[in-house]
Amino acid sequence: MKSQVLLVFLILFLISSCTTTPGGSQLATPNPNVMPRLDPSPTPSDSLLPLSCQVTDLNVYINEADGYCFAYQSHFTMGNKPSDGMEVRGPAVDNSSEPIRATFRVEVSPSATDKTLHQQAEDYLGDFSVIDPATFSWSEIQVDGETAWRVEPIPAMLSYRIIFVQHNGSLFRLMYWPVDIPEAQSDLTDLTQSTLGSFAFMK
């Protein structure tokens, strides 16, 4: 009898911890604290940056045109070619001519006023990968106070983690890869923790 009661409680817990989208994919329960915010270091009192970008022991990237900033560790570097766009890269994890690196990119486009964030993410992923977006793992998180969707793994040439968030009429895509190369996972974890933990929208 006691084991039956425990089984009922376990089933109820599992049901309450998941939700399902209209398309049938399971979503984790929203967790606003999935990535703790970075603590700011002492900075000049006249700094106008969001506090999470005032981390003086890390590098800080500021994009005034699109209105965002984030911090990242010193062993990561910015892409050095115009074709790279805004790209932060880790050290090479292999010796090939085009080595694999833990990489973070931000893409910004106008957000659609007639679609939800989830629908916009599905539209983007439908063009990005040949795999049905409903089969990916979708988690609702917070990015600087805004509701966001974290989706992974998304197979392309390498597998991606993409975070979709809207702010002030723009759709931001925070893109991390590769999530499928074991040798890059330590760097990718560091990169995710620093950039996602500090990412902020500028006033």
Image: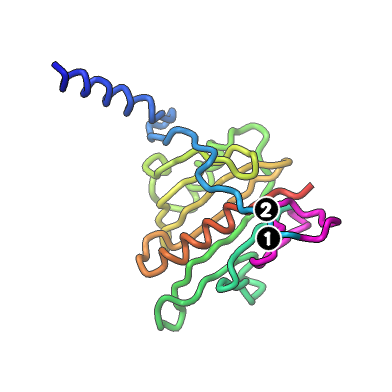
Q: Magenta stretch containing residue 134, yes or no?
A: no
| Residue drawn 64% across the image and 76% down it | 81
Magenta stretch? 43-66
How many C-alpha atoms fall within 10 Å of the one at disc 1: few (<14), some, or many (≥20)?
many
Image position, residue 82 (x, y; %): 67, 73
| Residue drawn 58% across the image and 61% down it | 105
Left or right of 44: which side holds 93? left
Q: Relative to 187, is 52 above or below?
A: above
Disc 2 and disc 1 in contact, CB within 8 angstroms = yes
Task: Name the foreground residue: 67 vs 158.
Answer: 67
Q: Residue furthest left?
A: 1
Task: Name the foreground residue: 167 vs 135.
Answer: 167
Q: Relative to 14, is 134 above or below?
A: below
Q: Residue furthest top?
A: 1
| Residue drawn 37% across the image and 69% down it | 183
- State the residue position of label 1: 55
How much space separates mark 2 and mark 1, taking CA atoms? 7 Å
Magenta stretch: dominant secondary structure: loop
Image position, residue 72 (x, y; %): 60, 64
Using the rendered view, name the quadrant where residue 100 is placed: bottom left
Callout 1 secondary element: loop
Q: Residue furthest right?
A: 46
Which numbered circle lies on residue 87? Answer: none
Which numbered circle lies on residue 52? Answer: 2
Q: Relative to 165, is 10 above or below?
A: above
Image position, residue 48 (x, y; %): 81, 54
**In the image, what residue type sits under mark 2?**
Ser
Image position, residue 94 (x, y; %): 40, 79
**In the image, what residue type sits under mark 1?**
Val
How many C-alpha atoms fall within 10 Å of the one at disc 2: few (<14), some, or many (≥20)?
many
